Each structure stands twice: as C-alpha cells, then as structure tokens.
Image: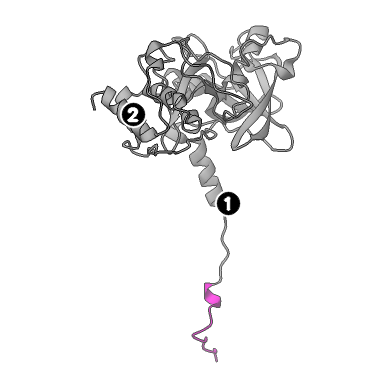
Amino acid sequence: MTKAKSKNDMSQWASNIDLEATRALIDELQTQMDGKNWDKLENSPTKYVANYRRICPKRPDWQNPWQIVPVHYLGANNRMTVCLKEAGLGDCPACQLRWELESGGDKGAAQGLRASIRTFLNVVKINQDGTLADDKVLLMGLNQLQFLGKRGVEYDPDEESELPLFYFFEKYGDLSHVETGRDLLIKAKEEKSGDYTMLDLKFQAEAPSPFPGTSEMLEEGLNNLPEVVPPLSATEMTALIEGRATGAMALNAGAVVQQVEGPADNTTPAPAAPANRFGGEEEEAETPQTEETPAEEPSDDPKASKAPPTTDPGAALKRLRDSQGG
C-alpha cells in the first residue's frame, strides 16, 4: 500500500539548476552582437593564453584587410557609432558635448564621450598546427595600442613580443595573403586599471602558408568591414546621448559615464579637441583621466573656446539641442 505524501512534503519540488546552457547563451549573445560573430580571445588574469588565428584576405574592392574607424560608445549599451569629426563627415555632437563638459570641469562625464580608434579584421580560428578549427569567419576588434601602437614610439622590429599587429604587416607583408600569408599566435592576458578591463596582447607570426579556409567560406562569411560601425546623423547621436533613443542612457546632471569593454575587448580614449584626423595624442593605457593622466590642453578652435563652462550635463545637452534647432 502506497503511503500518501504529507501536504507538507516538498520533496517533489526539490531540483538542481544547470547554468551551462545559460552560460553558453550569454556567450553566444555577447559574440554575435548586431548579427556579427565577434572574435572572443581566450584570456586569463594570471597568465597569457594562446589563441591561434589567420587573418582573412580582403575583398577586391577594399584597400586593406583591415578597417580603422574612430568611434564613440554611446547609450546604455555602449553602442559604437562613427565619430563624425574624426571621420571628416562633419560636426560631431559627442565631441562638442565632451569638450563643453571638459571645459566646465566635469572630467568624469566628459571621459565617457571621448573618441576611440578601433581596427576591425576578418579572422578565422585555427588549430595549433594551422588547420582550420571552425569554418566561421569572426570579426576581430582591436584598440589603438593593439593594432597601431603608441603614437610617437619607435618599435624595434626584432622585438616581436612588443610589436602592435600593424608592424607585422610592415615586417612580413600581407599576413592575409591566400598563398603566402602567415598564421598568428595571439597571447592574451586580462589586465585591470581602476574600473577598466583590457587585454594585453602579444603577437607572433608563423612561417608562410596557404589560407586554411575555402573560397566559398570567404564569399559567404566575410563581414563587410567598411560598414561594421554605422555612422549616425548628429541628431541621432544627440538622441542616443540624451536618452531619447531606444536603449540609450540619459546623461543626468553630475553623472559619470564610463566606457566598458566591448565585445572584442576594450575601448581606447582619444581626444576630441585636436583638429587632426584620428585624434591628437597617443592612448597611453586606456584608463580614466586622473591626476597622473591630465586632460589635453584646450583646443585652438575659437568655437571651442567660446563654449560656456558648466558642470551640468543637462544644461549642456539643452545647448546642444538648441544648436541643432531641435
């Protein structure tokens, strides 16, 4: 005879949860933002972790197998959008607002509006022996220090562990060439600086070898590098900054906006005030400005010098909207 369970017997509700499926989903969502398969380098905070990659060749109509883009990270999700000023497309409201906040002494709010230089490449994941590990094309994003290096520094081509990736192209030629290109060993280690997380990367080029993938994979899988980061209009950027755009974060009075690591790892600040394209000072360590890393000197731009000092982002945004007639 089966004994009836007590009304207070909760054993049937006992369960164990499995977090692995959710972890896998989170990883997939993080590496497939905007429909793109972002490359996520394996790394560790205690040691360098080996990653094997091959850069995909460029499409015939591209100048290079990489695309260098000056970007801002705007809104609650740090959406990447082209810096209109540095790209030579026109006045940039993010730069304008950032400079106004900087002039008013609100360096924290201004920091989140700094432009960054990002470089994008199509890559495939390979095994240690150079064979194809996955037939998917991944989108790799590198910051200024990782691809171009620190401005004004002369790198020794023989010290490969210290070379940014661009210098490997200078030293060995087209790393992406389908016949004579070279596989890459990328060692990645996570580093923390205050609230910022970034990856320190060390590159190593292997001997020349044919591209391990297929023509069909390249034809169907290459990300269109010139369109990776969409340019928004000045009005759209203002709405995103202010919080009137979907998923945007309003910049409230006294708010401190911090950049966080993007899908491919990290943001790199560059000044908005200098007029030269792609910024005017090197990106030392991608850290917030502190007493040890002061802001750049005021701009020579007469318009910038007339920006009324303020520490109220709300008031600055109102002036920004008024200047756009909105």
Q: Secondary structure at mark 1?
A: helix
Q: Quadrant of residue 205?
A: top right
Number of numbered discs: 2
Q: What distance separates the C-alpha of mark 2 from that of mark 1?
A: 40 Å
Residue at image position (52%, 87%) is: 6
Q: Quadrant of residue 147?
A: top right
Q: Which residue is mark 1?
A: 20
Queried whether the magenta region covers residue 50, the answer comes back as: no
Residue at image position (49%, 14%) is: 278
Residue nearer the viewer, 39 or 47: 47
For badge 1, the amino acid type reads Glu
Image coordinates of residue 181 in percent, x first then y, are: 63, 13
Q: Which residue is mark 2?
A: 238
For the N terminus, give its image quadrant: bottom right
- In-image side of 313 versus 120 (left or right): left
For badge 2, the amino acid type reads Thr
Image coordinates of residue 111 in percent, x first then y, are: 50, 29
User: The magenta stretch spans which residues?
Assistant: 1-13
Rate crowding at label 2 as few (under 14), some (14 to 19) or many (20 or more) other CA atoms within 10 Å. many
Q: Is residue 105 above or below residue 91?
A: below
Queried whether the magenta region covers residue 10, the answer comes back as: yes
Residue nearer the viewer, 242 or 156: 242
Residue nearer the viewer, 176 or 313: 313
Residue at image position (64%, 7%) is: 170
Which is the main secondary structure of the residues drawn in magenta? loop
Q: Is residue 162 visible?
A: yes
Residue nearer the viewer, 245 or 205: 245
